[in-house]
């Protein structure tokens, strides 16, 4: 049985005359009602950027739905009506979505991870483990889409971000076109959602897009010059070695 929780619709935000799908679309494949409710509640409460498209309780309908719909993230139990979660992975292996197993059976962990699951949650799991799993999935999804949702239906291209500065409980994004956007999440929240090969925390209050670093000034007060040609960012002494190793200047 497939339960459609929300209308199937595309939420579009237009930036620089280009349209982007800002949702991270999620499907829960789970045959037990209490577990369905638990997963849905945690996602809605902790990760509002994720939209639950539907909940499915059996193997065949999961395979059919995933094969005909665009999905970013799947929560998958292994014991399902009509088969196993591992069967779902095998029969949708050509599709591009992240998989988090959430199951009470530890013996399937190696097979699940070898077949491409990004995380294996063993029931009963803690909220911390749940958050770690979802944050890891969001990071992979953002890397693939090259997009980042920063709240209030605003999405930016990763390549358009010059740097992000902490403003207490908020974060201020500075973009290539010199516009700034204030987001109601702290810097640590975005650090977990940005690919580490492109974004580096050079100071406790600054994350920089290292693709836009064109020059480094070493010494007692190290600084980075960005691709706009005018912006210099200070690097903390504690971070300096790691930053310069990452930049390979």
Image: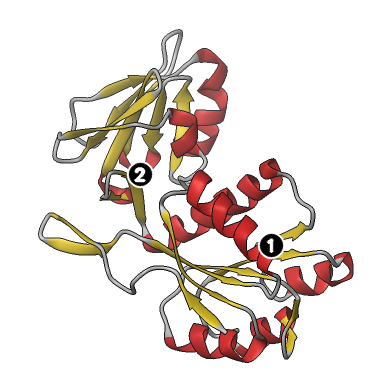
In this view, the residue in front, 103 or 212, is 103
Q: In this view, does 108 lie above or below 139?
A: below
Left or right: residue 173 versus residue 119 is left
Does residue 248 show up? no
| Residue drawn where x is 64% and y is 46% of the image | 132
Q: Label 1, label 2: how many angstroms apart (C-alpha)?
A: 45 Å
On the image, the x and y values in percent for residue 79 come to 77, 78
Label 2 sits on a secondary structure element that is helix
Of 49 and 137, which appears nearest the observer?
A: 49
Q: Taking 46 as reference, is 52 above or below it?
A: below
Q: Is residue 14 above or below residue 160?
A: below
1 or 2: mark nearer the eye: 1
The residue identified by callout 1 is 34
Mark 2, other Cα within 10 Å: few <14 / some 14–19 / many ≥20:
some
Q: State which quadrant residue 11 falls in.
A: bottom left
Q: Taking the image as drawn, is residue 145 in sight?
A: yes
- Looking at the image, residue 152 sits to the left or right of residue 236; the answer is left
Query: In the structure shown, which secondary structural element does the residue marked by tag 1 occupy?
Result: helix
Q: In the image, is residue 60 above or below residue 153?
A: below
Apparent side of residue 217 relative to residue 55 in the rendered image (left or right): left
Report the residue at 42% width, 20% height from top.
Answer: 205
User: Is 131 on the left or on the right of 202, as rendered?
Assistant: right
Q: Which of 91/238 is in front?
A: 91
Residue located at (51% from left, 83% from top): 66
Q: Give how far across and how far down residue 233 sits, in percent.
A: 33, 21
Q: Where is residue 185 in the image (x, y as percent from the top left)?
A: 40, 32
Residue 113's disc is none
Q: Name the residue tied to disc 2.
A: 211
């Amino acid at each position: 049985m497939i339960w459609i929780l929300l209308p199937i619709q595309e939420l579009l935000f237009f930036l620089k005359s280009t349209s982007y799908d800002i949702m991270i679309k999620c499907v829960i494949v789970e045959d037990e009602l209490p577990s369905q409710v638990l997963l849905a509640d945690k996602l809605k409460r902790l990760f509002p950027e994720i939209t639950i498209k539907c909940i499915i309780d059996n193997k065949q309908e999961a395979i059919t739905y995933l094969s005909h719909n665009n999905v970013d993230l799947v929560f998958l139990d292994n014991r399902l009506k009509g088969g196993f979660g591992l069967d779902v992975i095998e029969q949708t292996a050509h599709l591009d979505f992240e998989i988090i197993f959430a199951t009470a059976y530890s013996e399937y962990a190696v097979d699940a991870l070898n077949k491409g699951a990004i995380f294996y949650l063993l029931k009963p799991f803690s909220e911390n483990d749940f958050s770690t799993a979802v944050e890891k999935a969001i990071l992979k999804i953002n890397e693939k889409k090259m997009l980042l949702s920063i709240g209030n239906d605003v999405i930016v291209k990763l390549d358009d971000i010059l740097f992000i500065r902490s403003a207490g409980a908020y974060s201020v994004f500075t973009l290539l076109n010199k516009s700034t956007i204030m987001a109601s999440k702290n810097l640590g929240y975005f650090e977990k959602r940005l690919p580490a090969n492109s974004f580096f925390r050079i100071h406790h209050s600054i994350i920089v897009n290292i693709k836009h670093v064109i020059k480094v000034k070493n010494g007692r007060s190290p600084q980075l010059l960005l691709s706009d040609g005018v912006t210099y960012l200070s690097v903390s002494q504690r971070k300096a070695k790691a930053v310069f190793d990452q930049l390979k200047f």
